[in-house]
Image (cartoon, rainbow, N blue to C red):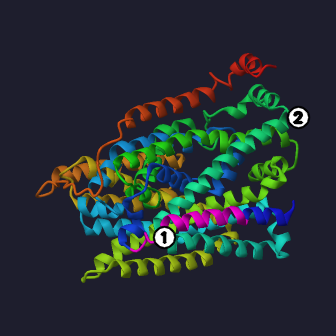
Amino acid sequence: MNVTLTLLTCMAFMAVVAIISYMKTKGEVNTQDGYFLAGRGLTGTFIAGSMILTNLSAEQLIGLNGSAFGYNLSAMAWEVTAGISTIIMALIFLPRYLAGAFSTLPEFLRDRFDDNVRRMTVVLFMVGYTLITIPSVLYSGSIAVLRLFDVPGLLNLSYEASLIVTIIMVGSIGALYAIFGGLKAVAVSDTINGVGLLIVGLLVPILGLIALGDGSFAAGLTTIATTETEKLNAIGGADDPVPFGTIFTGMILANLFYWGTNQYVIQRTLGAKNLIEGQKGVLFSGYFKVLVPFMMMLPGVIAYHLYQNENLQTIDLAYPHLVKEVLPQYLSGFFLAVLLGAVFSSFNSLLNSAATLFCLDVYKPFKKDKVSDSQLIRVAKITSLVIAVVSFITAPLLMLAPEGLWQIIRIFTGFYNIPVITIVLVGLFTKNVPALAAKVAIIFHVIAYALLKFVWQVEINFIHIYAILFAIELGIMLAIGHFYPMAKPWRFVPKAEVDMTPWRYAIPCAIILVGLIVTLYLMFSPVGFVGGISNAFIPSLVGL
């Protein structure tokens, strides 16, 4: 690999992204709304681009392809079924968020319940972001860079030292966008990097199929569609990473939490120019999720056909190995820039959202006097800097005991995703359930989930546990609302700061999206490619 060419093209693309982001945000981050919500002026394109790249990380790029290489396409459920959650977000959640002019999810919970519920959710989010999510994003992204490019060799350092240097480098550059540019800089840079990710994401499987077909795209496509078709099965069995039944239990809840209530994902929708642009952005991101199996899992299947007899140390090396083999030399720098862009996106989005939560839900309410915009932005920058430094210190620790810490990451997410989505749903659809119910549900969940994970040996998939706890907590909240209703029913008071006219094509787009999701599952199932239907049609389709 020509190191000089790779670095030059990488830096050139990153410089273009930085310049465009600066020009688009110049003079627009001096106010509270400007810094935290992009001046409530984000269009559908920037919302979709930012949501997509915030969601898609380097670890997914490697991990999903690794899952396809080692198992099948069952893990696509996390991505594809998220389209249903984007529909619910666009049609139900977003109109209420924008109508209330909320800047954060905890602000909505304060309006619906009380300040204590707001504080409890802020604590859950802040602890999770600072000690778990942000360090894991830095660590996994840096590992991806090390796997794809010989950083230790380039820097003449040990693997551990190279990892630390990469973490600090990636984190420092990503922090610049979040600290100095606010949400709009994040959204603009995400969108540009998102276009790059789309190009690379589609280019790798195309080049992979050409390599598999010895120079013929059609021959490569025929091979994966007619040979060892069990690799194309998305209907996961009990031993697969994602059993099919989980789609209908806890997965929809976990996805709905992520796309409808997770602050660092929904923050760009709260900065929408109007409801039309917000709904466009959210639904467009749902359409992008339908492409994930082709961009982030098909390469893993291609790699299986190419390298199944080679001794790869781990299935996670399947995608890096394929990229090294098929990507032209002159595109390696562009690929590195896009890969780093995906890491930057998740990292700076988390930083910006953590700073937003602290400033608007902790610092501002704590200060009795009126806080000026300049003071609030200054505090936000300091908060982002502190969190970034903490993440630089915490992230390298993951390499000391990666299996245990990765388990902690998965467990911790389960501590707060279900109670948050439960109280948001109850808050949106009831008027008499009091704040007491939300507090009881949160406390119950933390205790019950801890017992299920650490004390009792329960032979149930953790995704099913999500659904069981959701049902119990929903029952608890509704029961408290029945026996101890609010003295005065909650009344939502609209105070929208943007036009609330809904997008006329939102419903048709949602229906088409559902159709595409169903079609994908039919394609990658025993009635589609897996069942041999491709043996009759694919060869004639590609002219073989």
Against 18, residue 217 (above or below) is above
* Magenta region: 11-30
Q: Quadrant location of residue 113?
A: bottom left
Against 512, residue 84 (above or below) is below
Secondary structure under the numbered disc 1 in the rendered image: loop
| Cα separation between marks 1 and 2 | 50 Å
* Picture coordinates of residue 190, whole percent (x, y): 56, 58
Residue drawn at (33%, 70%), measured in percent from left and top? 119
Q: Nearer the viewer, mark 1 or mark 2?
A: 1
Left or right, 449 with reference to 191? left
Residue drawn at (87%, 59%), measured in percent from left and top? 1
> Outermost residue, left direction?
487
Q: Which residue is mark 2?
A: 214
| Residue closer to the observer: 326 or 436 | 326
Q: Of the residues under marks 1 and 2, which one precedes in the sequence?
A: 1
Residue drawn at (73%, 29%), measured in percent from left and top? 229
Q: Is residue 300 visible?
A: no
Left or right, 12 with reference to 215? left
Q: Are marks 1 and 2 in contact (CB under 8 Å)?
A: no
Q: Amino acid at mark 1?
A: Lys
Q: On the rendered image, what quadrant is the C terminus found in?
A: top right
* Picture coordinates of residue 350, whole percent (x, y): 51, 65
Secondary structure under the numbered disc 2 in the rendered image: loop
Left or right, 445 with reference to 315? left
Q: Quadrant location of residue 40?
A: bottom left
Q: Amino acid at mark 2?
A: Asp
Check if residue 139 falls in the magenta segment.
Answer: no
Q: Which residue is mark 1?
A: 26
Residue drawn at (65%, 70%), measured in percent from left and top? 170
Q: Main secondary structure of the magenta part?
A: helix
